[in-house]
Image (cartoon, helix red, strand yellow):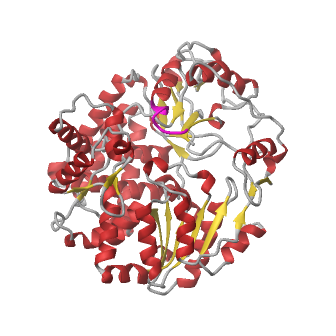
Amino acid sequence: MTLTAEQKDAVRCEDDLMLTACPGSGKTRVIISKLSRVIDEIRDTPRAVACITYTNAAVQEIESRLRHHLQPGDDAYFEICTIHSFCLNHIFRPFCHLIKGYKDGFKVLTPESAEFERHVTAICAQHGRYNLTFKDFEDFTQLRMDLDGRPVGIGIERGALTPEVATAYWKRIREAGFVDFANIIYYSLLLLRRRPEILSYVSAKFAWILVDEFQDTTDLQVEILALIAGKGRTRFLLVGDPCQSIFRFAGARPDLAEQFAGRITARTDKQLSGNFRSSSPIIAHANMLYPRTPPMTAVGRARKYAEQPVWQHGASAFTVITDYFLPAIEALEIPMGEAAILAPTWYSLFPLGRRLREYGVSIVGPGARPYRRNRQFAPLAEQVCGYLMEPRPDAIAGIERTLFNTLLDVTGRPHFDIFSYRGRVIVFRLLDHARRLHQIHMGGIAWLEAAAAAFSQVLIEKEYLTSGDKDVFAMSVEEMKTDMRNNKVDLANLTIDDLGGKCPRYTRTIWSSICRSGTSAASCCRGMPAAPSTRPPRWPCARPCPRSPRRRSNRVSPKRRCSGAGKADSCSLMARPTIRLSPI
């Protein structure tokens, strides 16, 4: 792996280090190189290295890229996870029996689950609140504890919730055997504080802990890391940038990074200042908004791109996008899959995403899926369909992880042997069934129904599910169908290509976002590239599909390809890149 001088300097540092990395500076490459280097050092020892990052997407990205540098058996020496997963697997789950209410086990309450909606609705009803909106439910997802065990969060700060409501909510879910993400962190901190043997166990296990996006770490998370560091057995590489903190609403405090570095006497004299992603005009504007020392510089191939940023103001974001943004990217011959719409928070993107889909613009991000995220079969179907469209070896790990989470959600029990040879065999059995069904059932809905039955049978035979669970996936598919009908999806013409496609530019497995009209386009899962391409998209067929619906504007009309001589019955939806919606 080729590294710059700044990157090499950071990787070779053997001291605790807080590394400030500007956008596009190759910090993921540094983390992967450091992981590989540490694994070489601890191989054949009882110790391991943990890499903690903020999102599951980042976990998958680092894990897939690291695997190119590993030896057989190295899986035992590293763990790449979110902070919630780290605390769950190494602190809370092994020792939850020491906490009142969890002596007999627990289930994780996710915001996407029906149980979450039921418990929130019940608590609000007890306090005279009905007809809850998305924002009301979101307030509960952002509840957390401070270092003194007091409920805090955006909802409490703005008066939408009270500490009493938060306490009642947590009491209710604990009595039902659930734990949410906020309490996974809080109870983990309590266990480390009150049980020295648990703290000794965790610190003895990990020789290094690498933390990505450290500027978005909260006070409880920093305290957990500080307790581990206090044992003197674990070294730290903390990578972040105070200018890129985006999770203040979730309790992130960039000032904690510098305080923590001081507590563990970490070095702060190394930076990554070269941006490989952006053009010189973009870098110049960024340096004016967020001055740095040393200043960020453009060092990649995009540095010579001369297009200047343009400011447009209008009555609404939707108006600006349809009147200015879409015509502009067409004039520059930029494919939609290389365009992104950013916003400060998720909230504004949900209604915007819905309006864009109704307008005929395919998107990936908030409002893109035409069904609810908590449908149990949906994540597994997404992963498997993606693999059918693009069978990459590194996608198998993602399918294993999704199968593990699906079984945990259905049964309430973790089946860790999914990550063993036995689990790998089962994954390939599921893929074999999926491939055969693909050859038989060309319709997307027929494939979903048949795959739900076949997957259930395999998992029952292998005793991961019981006979009483045989209809769980089938019921989930029915729920997905209802959601898609409500979103005006043309189920009769849904194909397997719509359920998983391949982005032409990024060659990455993706899930199709299905537009209100029933057409589909593959969603690009990587961000906007360094500089927009000046080449138009190369469609396999220049003929418009006879089935293609009319749009308000030809600028945003998705094209289709015809596999026959213009016959409607030989058309399939093209895996076309779409606009990505994301918070900044």
Residue 86 left/right relative to 50? left
> Quarter of the image holding residue 495?
top left
Image quadrant where residue 266 sits = bottom right
Name above or below for residue 554 compared with residue 462. Answer: above
Q: Residue at x 36, y 27 (%)?
A: 484
Residue 539 versus residue 89: which sits nearer the camera? Answer: 89
Does the magenta-highlighted stretch encompass residue 347?
yes
Question: Residue 270 in the image: x percent, y percent?
Answer: 70, 70
Is 336 positioned to the left or the right of 206 in the image? Answer: right
Foreground of the two, 401 or 296 = 296
**Position above or below: 442 against 243:** above
**Residue at point 60% right, 56% down?**
242
Task: Residue at 62%, 80% (x, y): give it.
Answer: 15
Q: Does the magenta stretch include residue 134?
A: no
Residue 584 visible, this angle: yes
Which residues, given as a range, are shown in magenta? 344-350
**Residue 503 against residue 153 in the figure, above or below:** above
Residue 347 percent coordinates (x, y): 45, 35
* Res. 578 image quadrant: top right
Looking at the image, residue 411 sits to the left or right of residue 9; the answer is left
The quarter of the image holding the C terminus is top right
Decide which of 416, 280 is in the foreground and name it.
Answer: 280
Question: Residue 35: x and y, percent?
Answer: 58, 72
What is the magenta segment's predominant secondary structure?
A: loop
Can you say whether 23 is above or below 338 in the image? below
Residue 135 horizontal/vertical position (percent): 36, 35
The answer to whether residue 67 is visible is: no
Q: In which quarter of the image is the N terminus?
A: bottom right
